[in-house]
Amino acid sequence: MGLLNLLFKDPFAFILVALPLLYSIIFHELAHGWVAYKMGDPTAKWLGRLTLNPLKHLDPIGTAMLFIFGFGWAKPVPVNFNRLRPLRKGLIFVSAAGIAANVLLAFISFFLLRYLSPAPGGPFYILLYYMAQINVMLAAFNLIPIPPLDGSKILMGFASVRIQNYMEQIEPYGFFIIIGALWLGVLNPLIDFIKLIIISLITLLIP
């Protein structure tokens, strides 16, 4: 569902959804920083990352991935996990915050699609449809337990010190592992499965 396809098919629709979709990844990072701040780490606040200013968040490669493949990332919000109290709970909550933000945005989009019933193909329908789909994709992608994705940090919050050390050792290579796995299509079934779970849960919550 790459957004570049939408650009070539309907430039107006592309312009309509581009900014809200970019803010989906901004809200993701902002959620990380806000929860970290509430749990004792002011690093993101000190560095001016608790803002909706896109220039503070967007990563060129992650943004390109968003438009080409339908998922991407922003510049990670810096978090000093040693400041979090309690540490394990802080690791889990801060890491899950971005995913929760995307699920919430997806829920709002599906809810509005359901109850406002905008005309299919109309501007509002296109906006809500892409907001829902991209946020489900972002949440599913970040739940993958490969460093440095959020899923790996959540896993580390529950794991033993030995597993934590192992995850930290492979983190410098995580980006290349992820890109390689995406290129080979290895992660696609897992992402689709997680997306199905998220959409099913959202559907259950919308009467």
Image: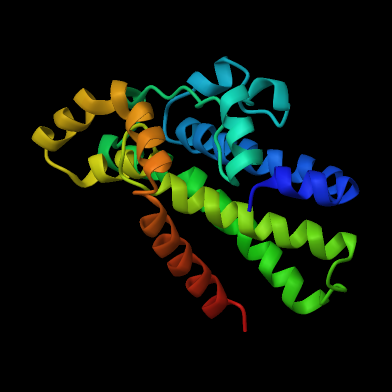
What residue appears at the point 77 percent right and 78 percent down from the top-left corner? 115
* In this rendering, position of residue 107 left or right of residue 165: right
What residue appears at the point 34 percent right and 49 percent down from the top-left corner? 186
* In this rendering, position of residue 31 left or right of residue 146: right
Q: How many marks?
A: 0
Q: Residue furthest bottom?
A: 207
What colouring method underlies this structural image?
rainbow
* Residue 27 visible: no
Q: Classify the position of the C terminus by image quarter.
A: bottom right
* Residue 3 visible: yes
Looking at the picture, does residue 110 appear above or below residue 16? below
Tell which of 95 and 35 is nearer to you.
95
Looking at the picture, does residue 184 appear above or below residue 102? above
What residue appears at the point 66 percent right and 21 percent down from the top-left corner? 56
Residue 26 in the image, given as x and y percentages of width and height: 64, 36
Q: Residue furthest top?
A: 47
* In this rendering, position of residue 187 left or right of residue 68: left
What residue appears at the point 49 percent right and 38 percent down from the top-left corner? 35
Residue 196 in the image, given as x and y percentages of width and height: 46, 68
Tell which of 62 and 32 is nearer to you.
62
Residue 13 in the image, given as x and y percentages of width and height: 85, 51
Residue 30 in the image, given as x and y percentages of width and height: 59, 35
Looking at the picture, does residue 172 appear above or below residue 106? above
